[in-house]
Image (cartoon, grey):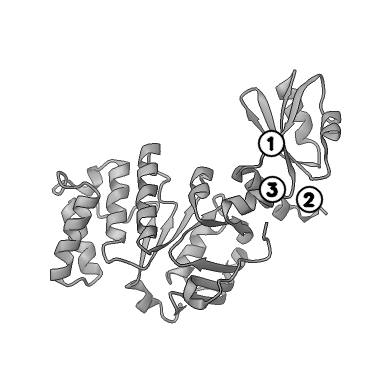
Amino acid sequence: MNTSGLPTANKDSDVAIRARGLTRRFGSLVAVDHVDLAVPRGQVYGFLGPNGSGKSTTLRMLCGLLTPSEGEVEVLGLRIPEQAEALKRRIGYMTQKFSLYEDLTVMENLQFLAAIHDLPRNEAKPRIAHMIERFDFGDRLKQLAGTLSGGQKQRLALAGSILHEPELLLLDEPTSAVDPESRRNFWASLFELADAGTTLLVSTHYMDEAERCHRLAILESGRIVADGTPKELCDALPGRVWLLRSENTRAAEVALRKQPAILGVAQIGTDLRVLADPGLDEQALQALLPGRVISIDAVAPNLEDVFVAATRIAREPGKAAA
């Protein structure tokens, strides 16, 4: 698990976003704390973190909407914020609130966004037609955007974000207000864009979405505490994961949560999934448990285990294993 900064690509041309020491303060609050970032072109790159971890603030700085307090940023080869105006034509930005005009129809929203992006009329018309077909809005062109379902609003917001064919698309928790099926369909659309060469930076707090990303960074308190591919992060987890069953599940969970060697405990059905320091073996774990232990099995870590370990260690540096 890399906790000292993100890797650099071999050539600058391989990188869509590069940040060094990116920092943003709001008075005494440090919302983003000296972040180093390198996002490869043509990939889906994820920001995973809880609310308040700095994901949205970082995205807003990267697209030029917010000026950094410190640090250097280059996006698509442009210096930000100095060249933010030139960057606007080359990126798309989609927020969790869906940037739609609810009192306009589906067609009017697309036409207005085409005008905002200064698309010539001869280009705008076929692109709008393509979006209508791609996102299945043929029978809803005259429907007000405010009356669409959550999934339909999401599709329309995405259509508007890519209408001008951006090289880079930044999405700030874009699936937080939609149902699971809409989320799956949305991610299928994102991978279509990546396959076509678009770079995507997606913030999320959903583990299943983070697992879909080609690469991701875990944020805690404004800092990147781990980064890599989902497999790399799981393989490098600094701890052991156990699945145990006890006569008294609740008592076992309460007892484990009091132990400094335990990083995390979660009940899965009648079992407990336990993330422990690397030095805690099966015998030592069993000694911590009250009552009769039915079974203890070592299991492969998942991304949720990585998230728990990385954020816990970041908050309590003394937890880092030797």
- What amino acid is found at the position of numbered circle 2 in the picture? Lys
Separation of residues labelled 1 and 2 (CA atoms): 21 Å
Residue 279 can be seen in this image? yes
Q: Identify which residue, 189 or 153, lies in the foreground.
A: 189
Q: Position of residue 198 (x, y in %)?
A: 38, 63
Residue 25 or residue 149, whichever sits in front = 149
Location of residue 254 by image quarter = top right
Q: Position of residue 246 (x, y in %)?
A: 74, 22
Q: Quadrant of the C terminus?
A: bottom right
Residue highlighted by disc 3: 309
Q: Is residue 104 visible?
A: no
**Badge nearest the viewer, 1 or 2:** 1
Report the residue at 75% width, 52% height from top.
316
Q: Nearer the viewer, residue 304 or 215?
A: 215
- Assign the N terminus to one quadrant of the image: bottom right
Q: Are marks 1 and 2 in contact (CB under 8 Å)?
A: no
Q: Is residue 40 above or below residue 228?
A: below
Give the side of residue 28 with respect to residue 99, left or right.
right
- Looking at the rendered structure, the kind of residue marked 1 is Val
Residue in view at x 66 percent, y 50 percent:
235
| Badge 3 amino acid | Ala
Q: Is residue 19 left or right of residue 98?
A: right
Rendered view: 120 above or below 258? below
Cα distance between the residues tagged 3 and 1? 15 Å
Q: Quadrant of residue 218?
A: bottom right
Q: Secondary structure at mark 3?
A: helix
Tell me where residue 182 sits by quadrant. Answer: top left
Element type where label 2 sits in the image: helix
Q: Which residue is mark 2?
A: 319
Q: Write down the residue under mark 1.
A: 299
